[in-house]
Amino acid sequence: MEKLRTIRCIYCIASLGMLVKVNDIDIIKNKVKVTKLDIDDYGSIIPLKELELNIPDDKSVIQILQNTSYAAIFTEDNVEENNSIIILANGMTMDELNNEKNKTIDKVANKR
């Protein structure tokens, strides 16, 4: 089960989604403040942009965001804009995040 979860996380980040740090959730307004992140060639987490996104009336998305510090998310609209609606969220553990960092480092090392 854990291996399948990791594969799903990798797929989420590799496709059109984005890696984020969850900063604050306002359940009353259905909003979440996140920091869009990237992983550089050396495995460092780079904050790119602060965003405020809309949460759908989907309890599973809210629950995922409440129970994790990092997530791979997809939005309906342009992911670079505030107020986009999250349509899918996949929480990431620190182990999964570290695996992504290591894979980035390995890919860069193999290119050299």
Image (cartoon, grey):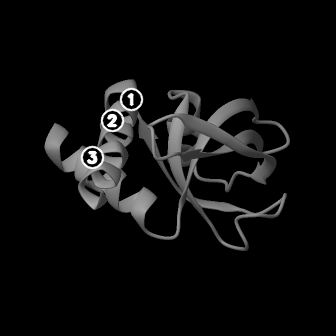
Q: Is residue 1 visible?
A: no
Up-down relation of residue 90 to residue 24 (above or below): below
Q: Which residue is mark 2?
A: 96
Residue 35: x %, y % from top left: 71, 40
Q: Residue furthest bottom?
A: 77
Pointer 2 and pointer 3: residues touching (CB < 8 Å)?
no
Q: Earlier in the sequence, mark 2 or mark 3?
A: 2
Q: Which secondary structure, mark 2?
A: helix
Q: What is the three-letter code of the residue carrying label 1?
A: Thr
Task: Tell me the crowding category of disc 2: few under 14, some 14 to 19, or many 20 or more residues within 10 angstroms, Cα based.
Answer: some
Up-down relation of residue 7 to residue 99 (above or below): below
Q: CA distance from mark 1 to mark 2?
A: 5 Å
Q: Which secondary structure, mark 3?
A: helix
Q: CA distance from mark 2 to mark 3?
A: 15 Å
Q: Residue at x 41, y 59 (%)?
A: 12
Image-based side of 45 in relation to 27, left or right: left
Q: Which residue is mark 1?
A: 93
Q: What is the three-letter code of the residue carrying label 2?
A: Glu
Q: Which residue is mark 3?
A: 106
